[in-house]
Image (spheres, rainbow, N blue to C red):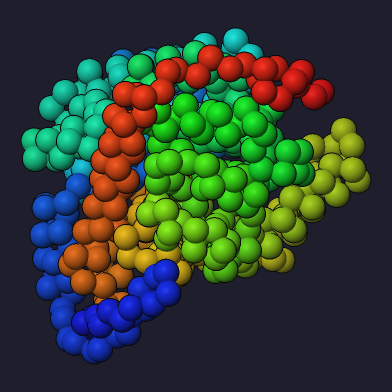
Amino acid sequence: MAMAASVVLMAGAGSQAWSQTPALQSDAQIAARVAKVLKETPLIDGHNDFPWEVRERYAGKVGAFDMRRDLSRAPPARGNPENTGGLMTDIPRLKAGHVGGQFWSVWIPVTITGAAAVKTTIEQIDIVKRLAAKYPADLTMAYTADDIVRAHKDGRVASLIGVEGGHQIDDSMAVLRAYYALGARYMTLSHFTNNHWADSATDDPAHHGLTPYGKAVVGEMNRLGMLIDLSHVSAETMQAALSVSQAPVIFSHSGARAVNDHPRNVPDEVLALVAKTRGVVMANFATSYVSDARRRWSAEQAAQASLAAGLFIGQPEQRKAALAAWETAHSKPVVTLAMVADHVDHIRHVAGIDCVGLGSDFDGIPDTPQGLEGVDHYPALLAELARRGWTDEDLAKLAGGNLLRVLRETEAVAKRLQAAVAPNEATLADLDGPPKP
C-alpha cells in the first residue's frame, strides 16, 4: 500500500505554492491514474541521444540492428570501448513507457566545426528520418504540435529533431534555415564549450551571454518557429536569450541548480524569468546533474585519474589499478528516481506547474538513476509525483501538455513574424566583427 496525497493550490508570486493533504491510494490505483493521463496526453521527452549511438555502435546504418528488439545488450560503441553498457532506448520500451513524442538529438561533438559540422549534422538528421521510415508502424516524423497529437492518437511515437549546439550552424543563418527545412524544431544555443556568439555553462565566459549576432540568431529562430533551447548555456546566456526571445524558451534537459549546484542546471532567478515568459524546463536524468554527492564524487574521480596518469606514465595497468583502488575505497553515491522528482518538484515550486517537463538525456549519459534505467520507466516517475500530491492535471502538464503549449505559442509567433519580417541575412562579421581566435 502506498500513500498518495491530494493537492491544494495557493496563489504565489510568479509560481504556485502547494500543500499536501494525505489520501490513501494503492500502487495499483496510482498506476491506473498514470496510465489514464498518458493515454489522454502524449508524454514528450525533450532529449534522447539515440541517433549518435546509432552512428557510434552501428556506423550510422539503421539496417544493422532491429529497434523492435531489446537493445539493452547492444554492442559497445566503436570509438569508445569503455562504453560497454547497452542502449536505453528501443521500440518495446518506448511503448512500455507510454512515450508519445520524442525529441531525438542530432548532437555532434564541439570538436567538429565548420563545413564538417554541417555535413555531420545533416547525416544525423538523416538517421532520424531513416529510423522513422524503417518503423512506420511505431515511429512517425512530427514538425508541429498538431503532428504530435495525431501521432499519439495513432499509437505512434512522434519523432522530432533537436540540434544540440549552436556550433552546428557554422555561424550561418542560411544553415539555420536549412536545418528548420529539414525538420529541426529546436536548437541548443551552445554545448560544452562557447561558440562565436553564445557562452556555455561549462566554459569560462567569453561573451558574457549572447553577442549581437547571437541575439540575431534567437530572432531568426523566433521567425522560423524553432524553439530556443537553453540547456548547456551559461546563466548569462539564459538571461540574454530570455530578454530577447519573442516566444517561450525551453530547457530540453536541465535540472534545478538549487537542488544540485551544477552549472548545467538552472538557477532560481532564471526559473523566475521562465515563469514570466511561460517557457518550460525539462528535468534531466544525468546522475551528476541530479545528485550533488555524485557530482562531487565524479570530480574527485577525474582528479584521481589525472593524478594516476601523471604518476604512472607509460604504465596503463598501474594507472588502471590505482584508479580501481580509489573507487573501491570511495563508493559511488547512489542516485535515485526520487532525486529526479526533487528537481521536478523544485522547478514546479519556483516556476509553476505550467513550466515543467521531462528531458531524460537517455543514451547520452553513462548511467541513470535507480528506477529510471530506460525509456520504459517514465510512468514510475509520474507515480512518484502522484504519491507526493500531484493531481492528474498536474501530471498531464508535466508529461507533455506544457511542451505542446510552448510549441503552439512558438508557431503563433512565427506566423506573425513571417508576415512582417524578412529572413535575416546578417553575417557574424556584420554584427560582431571578425571572430576572435
The number of numbered discs placed on residues in the rendered structure image is: 0
Relative vertical location of residue 300 with respect to residue 149 in this rendering, above or below: below
Q: Which residue is depicted at the point 82% across and 46% down?
A: 306
In the picture shown, does residue 264 fall above or below 309?
A: below
**Residue 86 visible at all:** no
Residue toward you, 220 or 175: 220
If the image is split into quadrants, where does the C terminus sit? top right
Q: Residue at (19%, 65%) from the top-left corner? A: 393
Q: Is 253 located above or below residue 22 in the figure?
A: above
Q: In which quarter of the image is the N terminus?
A: bottom left
Residue 409 at what x, y percent from top left?
30, 42
Give the x, y percent position of residue 396. 21, 59
Pick the residue in front: 170 or 269: 269
- Is residue 428 rendered to the left or right of residue 373? right
Tell me if residue 36 can be seen: yes
On the image, the x and y values in percent for residue 221 come to 44, 29
Q: Which residue is drawn at 58% across and 50% down?
A: 239
Q: Which residue is at the far bottom?
A: 22
Q: In this view, does 311 lie to the left or right of 120?
A: right
Which one is nearer the viewer's eye here, 50 or 274? Answer: 274
Q: Tell me where residue 141 sits by quadrant.
A: top left
| Place of residue 201 in the rendered image (x, y in percent of width and height, measured from the top left) | 65, 47
Specify the farthest residue to the front: 420
* Residue at figure coordinates x 16%, y 23% from the top left: 136
Is residue 187 found left or right of 389 in the rendered image? right
Given residues 157 and 15, the one toward you in this image is 15
